[in-house]
Amino acid sequence: MRPGIGEPGAAAALDDETLVARARDGDTRAYEQLVRRYQGPMYRLALRMLAGSGEAEDVVQEVFLTVWRRLDQLQDDSAFVGWLYRSTTNRCLNVLRARRPVADVDPDTTATRRVEAQPESAAELNDQVAALLKALAQLTPEQRACWLLREVHGRSYEEIARIVRGSTTAVRGRIARARAQLAEVMRPWR
Amino acid sequence: MALNQPEADYELPCGRSLDGLWERLDAVERGRADEHELTCPHCSTALRGLGELRAATGTLRAERPRPARDLTARIMAAVRAEPRAPRAMLPVDAGRPGRTEVSDRAVAAVVRFAVDAIDGVRARRCVVRATGADEDGTTVVEGRLAVTVTYGADLSRLLTVVRRRAAAACTARVGVRLAALDIDVADVDER
């Protein structure tokens, strides 16, 4: 069984499956524990996908509300976290698709402005990470999703393939391309 | 290197692949670069980029930007405002004037709380439905409960206790009679 991870102050460390089963019965307190446990990683994924904290919070809120509505459709309680990742990834991709016409006008400055819009970028990030975030913004949304899920969130290739509904070969290819592109941008740094 | 990796897309002019270099990064950073890696300008440039990328990724992974403090509250307010499927209402104290009803979910919650108080068991899903009434008018219910148990526990003794406590809680706290409780042991806790 996995104890509560991440967020400090999480109440009694019930395992995910127990909480999911209770939430399905309509137990909102059990669901709240799941929210506290996983809103952090989902927020960070959305933040890096969208490079905007306000939109990222909106995504996280919609994800947890939709998942609550559809808990009955979850066949396997242990698949809950994978479901959250899939839902968050897809919602981010939808937000980015809706944004695209704006980005097409001038992709370079648009991307840069978005990176700078992050409240943390000035004080908290070191230059190396700032360079990485800037490089990330140049990837296609699908590449960025695959790379983040693998390299930052530690999901397996198989799991990422399920999340983005592709083959593991395609996922490996996307991550390899992303890595090549990121390394290329990172090289002249320092 | 794994043999079943797909063919690398990114070949350097020297013939080595970027994927291959990525996997060699540990060895190289520990000073175990091979002759070619030490002298080839393509490889050393690529390795530098990959090294920077890996270091930056590590820092990024360690960063924990947090959402606004009230995000949980906002999410839960939206969740609680959601209309839920209509509940089945069970009559309680049917013989008395004035009607009292309790939802099947409320009874299920009482059962879960009672079972959680027992050492070595943890309630998961609980579904309760009414099957009729006693001769004295008490509502009779049946339930199905999923539990996890601690490894090494005496299962038959434990399940007897679960049934007894669940039935007692239904009688004392709700006023319905739990005539039968099916128990599924869904998992074993290792601690």
Image (cartoon, rainbow, N blue to C red):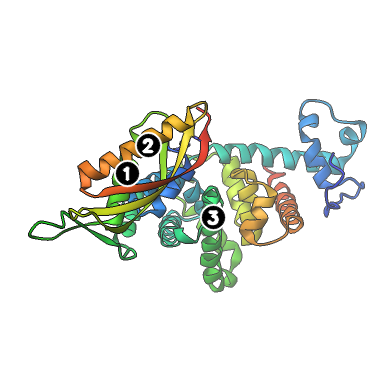
The chain holding disc 2 is B
Q: Secondary structure at mark 3?
A: helix
Q: Secondary structure at mark 2?
A: helix
Badge 1, how many Cα within 10 Å: few under 14, some, many 20+? Answer: many
Q: Position of residue A132 (x, y in %)?
A: 61, 47
Label for residue A71?
none
- A1 w.r.t. A135: above or below: above
Look at mark 2 in the image and give the residue it sits on: B162
Alpha carbon of mark 1 to alpha carbon of mark 3: how far? Answer: 29 Å
Badge 3, how many Cα within 10 Å: few under 14, some, many 20+? Answer: some
Q: Residue furthest front?
A: B135
Q: Are marks 3 and 2 in contact (CB under 8 Å)?
A: no
Image side of residue B55 versus residue B172, left or right: right
Look at mark 1 in the image and give the residue it sits on: B111
The chain holding disc 1 is B
Q: Position of residue B114 (x, y in %)?
A: 31, 38
The chain holding disc 3 is A
> Is residue A109 or residue B94 the one in the foreground?
B94
Q: Nearer the viewer, mark 1 or mark 2?
A: 2
Residue type marked 2: Val
In this view of the protein, can residue B165 be seen by the observer?
yes
Look at mark 3 in the image and give the residue it sits on: A83
In this view of the protein, can residue B68 be seen by the observer?
no
Residue type marked 1: Val
Q: Residue furthest left?
A: B97
Alpha carbon of mark 3 to alpha carbon of mark 2: how far? Answer: 32 Å
Quadrant position of the C terminus of chain A in the picture? top right
Image side of residue B71 versus residue A143, left or right: left
- The answer as to whether the residues below labels 1 and 2 share one chain is yes
Alpha carbon of mark 1 to alpha carbon of mark 2: how far? Answer: 9 Å
- B183 w.r.t. B101: above or below: above
